[in-house]
Amino acid sequence: MLGSLFGVLGVDDSSSAPDGRGPDRTIRRADPINDPSAVFAQPSYTAAMPDCRFEEVSARVDRFTPDERTDRPVLGAIRGTAGTLIVDGGASPTHLGAFAAELAARDRPPIAGIALTHWHWDHSFGSAALDVPVIACEKTAAGVATQAAYDWSDAALEQRVRDGLELEFSLPHIRKELPDRSDLRIVVPQVTFAESHRVDLGDTTVELRWVGGDHADDSVVIWEPEDRALFLGDALYQCLWGDPVFLTITGTRALLERLTRFDPAYAIEGHDENIADAAAYASRLSELHAACRLVEELGDDAVAAAGQDADLVETVGYLLAGR
């Protein structure tokens, strides 16, 4: 099956190798290792819990909304005359399978591949739901391969949390999203690239481009140029591997510079309920620029200088934590 689809999946046009914010992304302080019920009482999704919602973003782009209960991210689909490209593999086969079913019910073109924005479990563990190639940058493929080699039993997962190899924040989410991990199959990307890659979908060519950032240094954005839709994954979010979580001025400015090539009409972040239009996206980036400038110029006094702007104050706080 892989060979028959490589013509659709495009070519690596890399020239060289490359060197967070959503609904309450802060690490929880419950004790899920010793008392899983402290966070989630139910072992799995039930009929009483609403599903992710299918949304048609534009003529070529669909979205599956996020769900913070298990940290399910946005899933995307970009369609052309030659097929459909899925954006991110999702948190579980159930997650991605539900989205694929919604696409099929609407007679979208056949799915030709899955493009990953970064390696984190909630964006990659569902890829096994579909028998199609997975595309990712080399750093993402390496991260997924590391995850695929792990033991995913409760005991091993808890030990990795204690060893600092897994986020405490993720533990209850993984348990709830994937209550039985005895036969968990994590698909390592088969199509990889260093810096950029194009996927020819017939009447549109999608660009995958590495941008990095503090949240994950393998972050890739996915750009559909005809409708000007930009899937950002978690690239703009803070790094969760710290206490407190943080952003850095260097990482944020480098990321912002790499994003200047895109002018989206639709900016879709990995864990945001809302889709940003051009004005909201520009405001989002402007806030990051402003926060970097305040922290660089004023240091600890940047918080007071941010005034009553709660979002700016929060971003300044992340940057101060990352100094």
Image (spheres, rainbow, N blue to C red):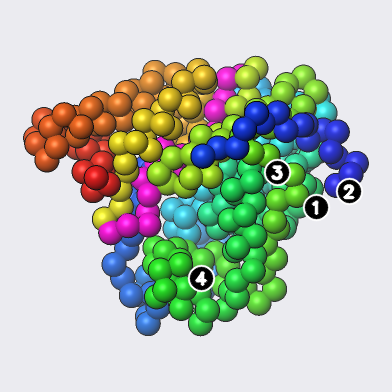
Q: Which residue is disc 4 drawn over?
A: 175
Residue, x 30% and y 48% (percent of image)? Answer: 246
Residue, x 70% and y 28% (percent of image)? Answer: 13
Q: Is residue 149 left or right of residue 233?
A: right
Q: Main secondary structure of the magenta part?
A: loop
What type is the residue that disc 3 sits on? Thr
Q: Position of residue 101 (x, y in %)?
A: 72, 47
Q: CA distance from mark 3 to mark 2?
A: 17 Å
Label annotation for residue 1: 2
Asked whether residue 187 is drawn in magenta, I would say: no
Picture layout, residue 77 above or below residue 290:
below
The secondary element bearing badge 4 is classed as helix
Magenta extent: 227-243
Q: CA distance from mark 2 to mark 1?
A: 8 Å
Q: Which residue is disc 3 drawn over?
A: 192
What type is the residue that disc 1 sits on? Asp
Q: Quadrant of the C terminus?
A: top left
Is mark 2 in CB contact (under 8 Å) with mark 4? no
| Mark positioned earlier in the residue sequence (1 or 3) | 1
| Mark positioned earlier in the residue sequence (2 or 1) | 2
User: In the image shown, does 17 or 271 lie closer to the viewer?
Assistant: 17
Q: CA distance from mark 1 to mark 4?
A: 25 Å
| Mark positioned earlier in the residue sequence (2 or 4) | 2
| Mark positioned earlier in the residue sequence (1 or 4) | 1
The secondary element bearing badge 1 is classed as loop
Q: Which residue is disc 1 drawn over?
A: 131
Q: Position of residue 159 (x, y in %)?
A: 46, 78
| Mark positioned earlier in the residue sequence (3 or 2) | 2
